[in-house]
Image (cartoon, rainbow, N blue to C red):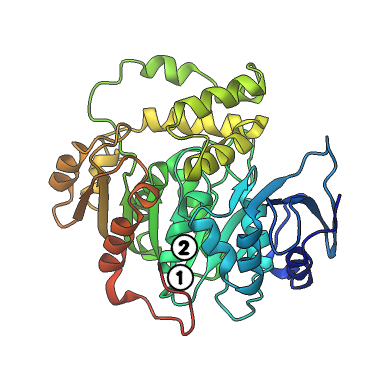
């Protein structure tokens, strides 16, 4: 194996462990260089991180890495020259990150060379519930982003980049998912998640924040608004999960099912992985592949499966009416709100927009030509709508990167 390209050594030299988080205390990141360039060949090298120790070594066949980063030689060279080049290359698809986005993006943050307040960091915050994993960046009024069922903060990285010039942004993994705590036996219902978000705000010293949630995360953002209105400034729901208005004939059966059965892995891992990649359009490429990786990373653990099934069960059982019913409480929501709908959304049909308008006449609405994840499928339009809605409530951070 030839010596590693000089750019990898340069990145290792400026590696800042304060911006890097390895949940297990150690990590092996495979850095792959495709092709040849500038007199140096391609190949694969592993960056091994153990606490404050780090070492670059040749990748060994049969040794599995925790995360893989792959780019051609020219892209690696640009990353080495430009301190912001890593995230830019990732967003543009010139650098791929697979298996573990928390570690992969953490590597880019740790080798960016940036030291000023508001730089991108991957971290975990110790709350009363347990660790909450977070990607944070920027300065200004706080914005907290909540992903959907089975998703992680990975689905909000473009939104972090789009808002970090004006706000202090936090994209978190909800409990049960990603790199956050996964308590066995937790209810994983909207109230549980809302308490977790409040605990995150408490730990971070945030009195009030804007909340942005996609799918189940949108439902959680609304629940925080219902229960803790004093902590919420404005709410953005990106294709948010809403309580069903039609009959739910499977309710008795769903109530009888125990999500703890998810602690057992019935289907072999290769079967589960192939099914998920076939189910998700484009699951082998781009952001879809990253999302599948992140989903599988949690689902293929016993606690992650139990959390997924419990959350899915509660989405179905969400009561629409009554004193604690979703639509009853939505009519009394105090926070200003924006709902972004996808015209091709098959999970939360755009027909729900009519019911939201009736329940919450003052809410704002945007309809886009996309599916269930607007911030990834229509990022420019989605982020423009969010910035307009949040308006002048943010404070620009000098020198912070602007959205592309």
Image-quadrant location for residue 122? bottom right
Residue 397, percent from left and from top: 45, 81
The residue at the far bottom in this view is 398
Pointers 2 and 1 in contact (C-beta within 8 Å): yes
Vertical placement of 230 versus 393: above or below?
Answer: above
Mark 2: give few (<14), some (14-19) or many (20+) Cα within 10 Å: many
Number of the label disc, if any, that sits on residue 164: 1
Q: Position of residue 294 (x, y in %)?
A: 57, 41
| Local secondary structure at mark 1 | loop
**In which quadrant of the rendered view does residue 320 lie?**
top left
Q: Residue at x 82, y 46 (%)?
A: 59
Q: Quadrant of residue 261?
A: top right
Q: Residues within 10 Å of mark 1 (few under 14, many from 20)?
A: many
Seen at 63% across and 54% down, the residue is 72
Residue that lies at the very extreme toward the front in this rendered image: 39
- Mark pair 2, 1: CA separation: 6 Å
Residue located beneath label 2 in the image: 160
Of residues 30 and 246, the one drawn nearer to the viewer in this rendering:
30
Q: For the point 13% across and 45% down, which residue is it?
A: 358
x then y, percent, for residue 366: 21, 53
- Name the residue at 26% across, 51% down: 339
Total count of labels:
2
Front position in the image: 11 or 381: 11
Label 2 sits on a secondary structure element that is helix
Q: Is residue 206 visible?
A: yes
Percent position of residue 272, x then y: 59, 23
Query: Can I make out residue 126 in this image?
Result: no
Above or below: residue 185 compared with residue 246: below
Tell me the quadrant of the picture where the C terminus can be found. bottom left
Query: Which mark is on residue 353?
Result: none
């Amino acid at each position: 194996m030839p010596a590693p390209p000089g750019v990898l050594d340069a990145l290792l030299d400026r590696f800042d462990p304060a911006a890097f988080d390895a949940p297990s205390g150690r990590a092996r990141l495979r850095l792959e260089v495709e092709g040849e360039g500038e007199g140096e060949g391609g190949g694969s090298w592993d960056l091994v991180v153990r606490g404050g120790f780090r070492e670059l070594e040749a990748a060994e066949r049969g040794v599995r890495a925790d995360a893989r980063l792959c780019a051609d030689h020219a892209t690696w060279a640009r990353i080495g020259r430009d301190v912001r080049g890593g995230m830019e290359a990732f967003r543009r698809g010139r650098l791929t990150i697979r298996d573990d986005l928390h570690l992969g993006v953490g590597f880019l943050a740790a080798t960016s060379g940036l030291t000023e307040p508001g730089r991108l960091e991957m971290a975990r915050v110790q709350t009363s519930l347990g660790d909450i994993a977070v990607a944070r960046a920027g300065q200004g009024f706080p914005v907290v982003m909540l992903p959907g069922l089975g998703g992680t903060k990975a689905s909000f990285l473009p939104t972090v980049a789009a808002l970090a010039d004006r706000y202090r942004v936090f994209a978190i993994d909800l409990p049960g998912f990603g790199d956050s705590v996964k308590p066995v036996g937790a209810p994983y219902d909207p109230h549980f998640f809302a308490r977790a978000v409040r605990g995150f705000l408490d730990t971070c010293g945030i009195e009030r924040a804007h909340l942005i949630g996609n799918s189940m995360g949108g439902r959680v953002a609304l629940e925080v608004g219902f229960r803790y209105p004093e902590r919420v400034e404005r709410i953005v729901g990106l294709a948010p999960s809403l309580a069903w208005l039609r009959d739910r004939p499977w309710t008795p059966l769903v109530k009888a099912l125990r999500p703890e059965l998810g602690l057992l892995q019935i289907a072999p891992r290769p079967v589960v992985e192939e099914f998920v990649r076939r189910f998700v359009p484009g699951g082998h490429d781009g952001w879809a592949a990253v999302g599948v990786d992140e989903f599988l990373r949690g689902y293929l653990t016993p606690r992650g499966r139990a959390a997924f099934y419990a959350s899915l069960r509660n989405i179905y059982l969400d009561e629409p009416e009554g004193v604690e019913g979703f639509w009853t409480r939505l009519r009394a929501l105090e926070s200003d709100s924006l709902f972004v709908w996808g015209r091709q959304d098959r999970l939360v049909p755009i027909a729900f927009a009519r019911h939201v308008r009736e329940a919450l006449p003052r809410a704002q609405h945007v309809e886009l030509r996309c599916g269930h994840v607007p911030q990834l499928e229509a990022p420019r339009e989605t982020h423009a709508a969010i910035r307009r809605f949040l308006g002048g409530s943010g404070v620009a951070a000098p020198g912070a990167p602007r959205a592309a």
